[in-house]
Image (cartoon, rainbow, N blue to C red):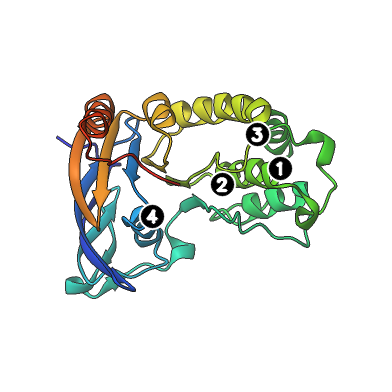
Amino acid sequence: MPNENSLAATFQMQRGSLFADVSFTVEPGKPLAVLGSNGSGKSSLLHALSGLIAIRAGRIALANTTLDAPGERCFVPPAERRTSMVFQDYRLFGWLSVRGNLEFAVRARPRTATVGVSEIDELMTRFELNQIAGHRASALSGGQSQRLAIARALAARPEMLLLDEPFSALDRRVGDSVRAALGRAINDFPGPVVLVTHDLTDAQRFCDQAILLEHGRIQAAGPVDEVVNGIESATVLGRDTTPEG
């Protein structure tokens, strides 16, 4: 029986030429990896969950609260969904400092009037941001921006965490440390986590479940090891379903 804080999504959506028709559930403590080639609908799926794209039919519900259901004339705007998303293009506030971006996320929490200084300090240490705390976000490198984007997403204390290729801009040295930090954060996160990635190793490292998308449809779903092994077997047999960037 699904946990009462689960994400339950069964919906259809249209984004340009892509028509997606999916159904899945994500329970707290069992992160979901979304795999697939370019254009398969991975990022679009996250955008629907976050409210950036309205679905055409079906229902998205988090913790028994309906977020989007056209048939019920229900649509909760993105800012009211208590969802944090790490975008591929970061979407940081470039005019604010590193610390300012984290403070903004804390202040944006519902019914939160004060900034959790110790919590921000802990996030900055965890994601190796202390030395650049006063730098404007617009002046950061790609890897620094990615680390800040992840930290800011966690600072908001969301009920659901959405990650779109969170390690794509990180070099190996920094990438390993940030992977470890994010791994701990995912393990401690109390709500559903959805990770879009092209890296099968990351999928197995961070997630319990996985779905494989092709042209907006789920072609495989189940325990992450089973889905990844199926992808690898199909590739060996000549049917290349290996996820791309």
Left or right: 89 in relation to 229: right
Q: Secondary structure at mark 4?
A: helix
Residue that appears at 39% across and 64% down = 51
- Tell me which label, 3 or 1, sits earlier in the chain: 1
- Tell me which label, 1 or 2, sits earlier in the chain: 1
Which residue position is annotated with label 4? 46
Which residue position is annotated with label 1? 144
CA gap, disc 3 and disc 1: 10 Å
In the image, which disc is placed on residue 153? Answer: 2
Residue 144 % position (x, y): 71, 42
CA gap, disc 4 and disc 2: 14 Å
CA gap, disc 1 and disc 4: 23 Å
CA gap, disc 2 and disc 3: 21 Å
Residue type pointed to by label 3: Asp
CA gap, disc 1 and disc 2: 14 Å
Mark 4 or mark 2, whichever is nearer to me: 4
Residue type pointed to by label 4: Leu
In the image, which disc is placed on residue 171? Answer: 3
Residue that appears at 63% across and 37% down = 170
